[in-house]
Amino acid sequence: MDQFVFTLKDNNQKAFNSFFWFLFFLHLIAAAVIAVNPSNNYQKNTAALSIAVFLVVTAVFYLLKNKFKQKNYQLVLFVVMGLFWLALAAWLPAVIVTIAIIFAFFILQKRSSAIFSTENIIITRSLFKKTYSWAAVQNAVLKDNLLSVDFKNNHLLQVELAADNIPIDENSFNQFCKLQLLTPNS
């Protein structure tokens, strides 16, 4: 086999969920501050309505969590966050929130992968793609769904393979790597 392709398990979803909750509570705090200290009655009503919508949507999704996916919940609340800022005619926060949301969803959709070919190793993550020559690698092993690449500069890359990978024979992959490491000019 000339190359092995793996889909890597990502922690992007976990990081995105943390980012979502940070933005959610930040918006609740901003709405509470505006509701307590408004410059006019419209701002007070908009902030109070926003807080109520945040809490009702959270309660509905929590009570019906088996029927809804968490992505749907996050999308609904992100729309509410954007509308909150637009209703207050705060264009800059609305644009910043929208850009952050689009960027986060873009990152979330990218799958990390590793391609081991006879020429090199290519690791693709959400934001970067790195190519390593076999000459920079001391050892590469696949064992129990854990991919380990030991580099000669004392760096170690260990990643778990995603559950949706096509089953690959560990022995044939490990033999392939040994062969590449023993081949001169690799």
Image (tube, grey):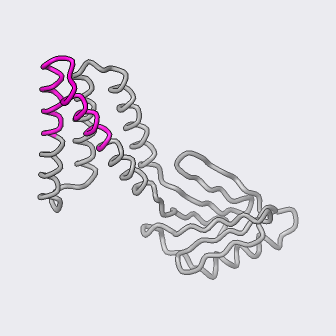
Q: Is residue 98 above or below residue 132?
A: above
Q: Which residue is drawn at 56% across and 67% down?
A: 159
User: Dividing the image into 4 quarters, which one contains the C terminus?
Assistant: bottom right
Q: Is residue 18 above or below residue 4?
A: above
Q: In this view, does 163 lie to the left or right of 4?
A: left
Q: Residue at x 52, y 63 (%)?
A: 8
Main secondary-structure element of the magenta-colored stretch: helix
**Where is residue 139 shown, x and y percent of the image?**
74, 72
Residue 70 included in the magenta stretch of the image: no
- Res 90 → quadrant: top left
**Where is residue 160 shown, x and y percent of the image?**
52, 69
User: Dividing the image into 4 quarters, which one contains the N terminus?
Assistant: bottom right
Please state the extent of the stretch shown in magenta in the rendering.
25-53
Question: Going by the picture, which residue comes out furthest to the front?
Answer: 37
Residue in the foreground of this view, choosing between 51 and 77: 51
**Where is residue 179 shown, x and y percent of the image?**
77, 74
Q: Which residue is drawn at 55% across and 64% down?
A: 6
Q: In this view, does 150 lie to the left or right of 158?
A: right
Q: Residue at x 40, y 31 (%)?
A: 99
Q: In this view, does 97 lie above or below 20?
A: above
**Where is residue 183 shown, x and y percent of the image?**
83, 70
